[in-house]
Image: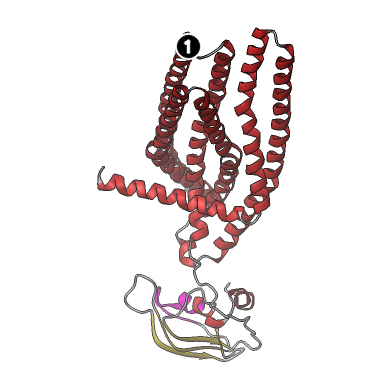
Amino acid sequence: MTDHDDADARLRASVLRKVLAFTFRLWRRTPLLAVACAGTMLLATLTEVFAPLYAGRIIDAAGRGDVGAAWAAFAVITALGAAMVVLRHLGWWAITPLTLKMMQDVTQEGFARVQRLSTDWHANAFSGSTVRRITRGMWALDTLNDVLLLSLLPSLTVLAGTVVLLALHWPILGLVMGVGAIAYIALTVGLATQVLAPTARLSNQWDTRIGGVLADAIGANAVVKAFGGEAREEALLAKTVAKWRKRTHRTWMAFTWAGSGQIALLWLIRLAVTGVALWLWMRGQASAGDMAYVITSYLVLNGYLRDIGMHIHQLQRSVNEMEELVQLHQEPLGVPDQTGAQPIQVRHGAIRFDDVTFHYAGQERPLFRNLDVAIPAGQRVGLVGRSGSGKTSFVKLVQRLYDVDDGRVMIDGQDVAHATQASLRRQVAIV
């Protein structure tokens, strides 16, 4: 593995950890709903582990002519089916308010955070792309909840339970099915993390760019019309869509090849399990009912294995689509409130810059050095100077859109650095 591949693998693992940690924090806000959802679905899938066993007992009882035993096994299957229906209903009932609450929270909190990010961040971010990051991540969270709570965990439970039950009867059959299942899961995880995740990440980035180009061109349509720039905007969109199409085609083809490989492996596992079952029957170690049990168990397991493959792909895709939302929630606020900040009380409006030094990030030369300015309350002041001399920056420092490097900016004798952002912005406006 090259250093580039190793770094890419670490990046994917880091993204997965961040997205899952983000989701777990949301679950902890409503822990009872999360536990109820996962627990009921887990119990519901366990019923499918035992149903094939009693189906085999019905066949053996019928072969012996034991009507009572056949009906007893049938009664157990009926009870298992009823339990599965009730438990699944409870699981779906629990996940509805859980997911809606989580989607509502990430949307509102994402919007609140965007409003409080720095002016530099907003100057370098397309509004359309930002909207796309929030809405796509919101719906990806819905998929992630379904995969983790309703699908993947129950599927793994059925897999483990079926393999254990078979191994208790016929160790070699349990071994074959267990090895086959592990190989299938390993193949699926490898494809999802090493092949599908990188291509999906690139196509998602270009999908975000399309949203940005569309939203900003439409939002600035009056300016576009004024300068006759329609053709230029259409050419820009066409170029972006062409790149998106190329990336998305690569992603979809990767999913196609991955799916074909998984289906081929499932057929190999099916042939191996059926062959071993026939061999056990020929040696007199399995009855007709046992054969029915094994084949039915594998059919159930085969369905869940295919589901696991689909769930892992959905997990990978939802993680990719939530990545940008999680990054947004982790984006540091431009100028956060200091510890112990208090609401500012502006009564007169006197402004003073007291020995202020300030420079923008990435610039060595200060824009202001030891600046002292006093503007009495009620006085009108005009700022005149060449472009880049600091006129707009002066006003932004009054509103504390940036923190000064040294000195103080005060309104009515109150240092704006010690005021809460909300109170300052409500009373000091920039038009």
Q: Residue at x 72, y 32 (%)?
A: 83
With 343 as the anchor, is 360 left or right in this view? left
Residue 129 appears in the figure: no
Q: Residue 385 occupies which quadrant of the picture?
A: bottom left
Q: Is residue 421 left or right of residue 281?
A: right
Instruction: State the residue position of label 1.
Output: 278
Q: Position of residue 205 (x, y in %)?
A: 44, 45
> What secondary structure is marked by label 1?
helix
- 124 horizontally vs 350: left or right: left
Q: Magenta segment range? A: 383-395
Q: Is residue 138 left or right of residue 181?
A: right
Q: Position of residue 69 (x, y in %)?
A: 71, 16
Q: Which amino acid, mark 1?
A: Leu
Closer to the camera, 137 or 190? 190
Q: Is residue 366 magenta?
A: no
Decide: is 380 above or below 263.
below
Q: Which quarter of the picture shows residue 337?
A: bottom right
Q: Residue at x 61, y 22 (%)?
A: 53
176 and 416: which is toward the camera:
176
Res 84 seen here: yes
Pointer 1 local density, CA inside 10 Å: few below 14, some 14–19, many at least 20: some
Magenta: main secondary structure: loop
Of residues 289 and 77, which is closer to you in this image?
A: 289
- Horizontal and vertical percent for residue 273? 46, 18
